[in-house]
Amino acid sequence: VCLAIPGKIIALDKKKQNATVDYGSGTKRKANVSLVRVKLGNYVLVHAGFAIQVLDEKEALETLALFREMLSLQEAER
Amino acid sequence: MFSLCDKPLADDIISQIAKAKVHLRFMHVCGTHQDTLVKHGLDVLLQQCGVEIGQGPGCPVCVTTPKEIEEILLLAKHGKMITTFGDMTRVPGVSSSLSEMKTEGCDVRTVYSIEDALILAEKHKEKEVVFMAVGFETTAPTTASVLLRDPPLNFSVLCCHRLIPPALQAILQMGELKIDGFIEPGHVSTIIGIKPYEFISNTYQVPQVIAGFEPLDLLMAVWMLVRQIKQGNAVVENEYVRAVKPQGNRKAQHVMQQVFEPVDVKWRGFPLIPQSGLRLRKKFESYDARKKYEDKLVLVAEEEFAEPIGCLCGEVLRGLISSKQCPLFGRECTPDNPVGPCMVSSEGNCHIQYRFAKK
């Protein structure tokens, strides 16, 4: 039940608090955005029809580099 | 979108874990984590490196109690339109399940979101619509958000939401299993952040890492737990930084606080866990199915309902046995003919085991 899918906000109706989210491969769906502060173009995690968190694009892109750094630090300590 | 694939990096992580020469048992509490672990064979791979990982009570459908199932079945029998998430409809109760009752003419609808249930209530003003609200902190804010919008009065909620940190504490307090570390559920954590887990590390000296759902996320979380243990630490670390902020989602926390208050509840396989459930605050009483239909639910109010005969879902949920150790697994109990909820839900340990690694 806690499954959440990442997607990009491609249309936003702030009044109605809903957005169209593009999940890639042509899948687009409406999501309620009342639980988050979002802008057009943001990546969000969507769970049961609601965006529950904005994904940090910078952190996402740097995740692998961060992992590599942690590993090499550990290796150096041995 | 954000590809998190890097074979050499995965190999590096695994080889460092193996080099640490450990014998540890970790627990996670999330069906999606279990799915990733079993689907990609990481459970077996990590076992070979000395790390056992098992699923605890991390499947909302599975931990819903037999009594809650009887409550919703009773409301269906009384002609209410029942709306809930797909897996919930197939969980067997004492005499029936929601999906069986549907074939007998009861009005049971599967919804993807509580918003779909609300739309049904608006469309069918002549019907009483009950949404069976299951789920952890990830899902509870969606229920709260809808209740704050003044839904029509023919709409109500049978609240079965539960909270993860009190369940982790219950597992440690029961002491049936030695747990060297917890892998915490990433999406629950997007809502609650880091702080609600801290008392567990402080009180029980158990390290915790919040993890995402890609294979690399989980490998890295295991690596981080091993590092903590080697360094003698017991703190909460966050591996899923791209989605989990230290403070969580404040807006979602706020709507939850407005609508719910914590309450002592049972979980399937567990005794009463203090402050581990959510109930609607008095202000939202008119939407509380337990208040609204008190006269009907009185029939099951004082009763205790047993687990299905031979079913070991309780032991599976406490992490004491693997699915395959249950004598019913793959014989009397299959996804087509489930005896207990862990074989029903796609997030249940038995269902996942059956799907990816039957033998």
Image: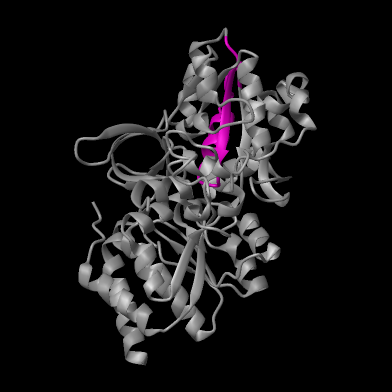
Please say whether residue B141 is one of the residues in the magenta stretch: yes
Q: Is residue B140 left or right of residue B307?
A: left
| Total marks placed | 0
Q: Is residue B288 left or right of residue B145?
A: right
Residue B169, position as x, y percentages in the image: 65, 61
* Residue pictured at 42% horizontal, 84% vertical: B21
Q: Residue at x 61, y 31 (%)?
A: B93
Residue B179 seen anywhere in this rendered image of the structure: yes
Could one spot residue B148 in this view of the protein? no
Q: Which residues are magenta?
A: B127-155
Q: Residue furthest top?
A: B126
Residue B111 image position (x, y, % from top left): 45, 27
Question: x%, y% of residue A22?
Answer: 26, 38
Apparent side of residue B12 relative to residue B336 in the rendered image (left or right): left
Residue A11, quarter of the rendered image = top left
Residues B32 and B252: in front is: B32
Q: Which residue is at a point 42% across and 55% down the rendered structure image?
A: B33
Side (left or right) of B266 relative to B320 = right
Q: Is residue B208 above or below residue B280?
A: below
Q: Which residue is located at x 58 percent, y 41 percent?
A: B255
**Relative image position of residue B269 (x, y in whole percent):** 64, 49
Q: Residue furthest bottom?
A: A78
In this view, the residue farthest toward the right is: B302
Let me know if residue B236 is in the magenta part. Answer: no
Q: Nearer the viewer, residue B192 or B296?
A: B296
Residue B77 image-quadrant placement: top right
* Type of colouring: one colour
- Against B159, residue B205 (above or below) is below
Q: Residue A25 occupies which quadrant of the picture? A: top left
Nearer to us in this view, B140 or B96: B96
